[in-house]
Amino acid sequence: MSTFLLTAKMNIPLNSGMRIEKGQVFEVNLPFGHLPFDSIDSKSRVTKILELQGFDVCGHESILSGGFFDFKKL
């Protein structure tokens, strides 16, 4: 598994008044050879990590891209 740190590039508004703050960091483990937003499986893993931290991205799947997050491989 490869570990990535995802950092929000901007404040991202979500459902029920929640939002991901600019600079907020999330750690994601993905199979070797994959990047955080390069496949449906990778995006699903990122979504699950966000949900485990209390963020509902349902209806906001478009945020799952390099436009909203920087990512760095550890």
Image (cartoon, rainbow, N blue to C red):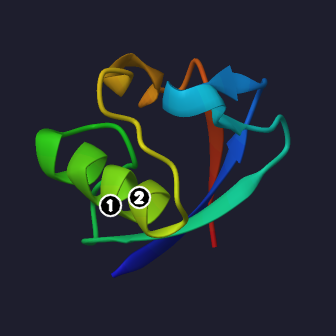
Relative height, residue 6 to residue 12 (above, below): below
Q: Residue at x 58, y 18 (%)?
A: 67
Q: Residue at x 33, y 82 (%)?
A: 1
Q: Amino acid at mark 1?
A: Lys
Q: Amino acid at mark 2?
A: Glu
Is residue 63 rendered to the left or right of residue 20? left
**Which residue is under mark 2?**
51
Residue lying at the far bottom of the rendered structure: 1
Q: Dot 1, crowdedness within 10 Å: few (<14), some or many (≥20)?
A: some
Q: Residue at x 73, y 57 (%)?
A: 25
- The answer to the question of whether label 2 and label 1 lie on touching residues, with beta carbons closer than 8 A, is yes
Which of the pair 34/66 is nearer the observer? 66
Is residue 70 rendered to the left or right of residue 58? right
Quarter occupied by the C terminus: bottom right
Relative height, residue 26 to residue 21 (above, below): below
Give the image location of residue 41, x and y in percent.
15, 51
**Which residue is under mark 1?**
48
Say what secondary structure mark 1 lies in.
helix
Which of the pair 43/4 is nearer the observer? 43
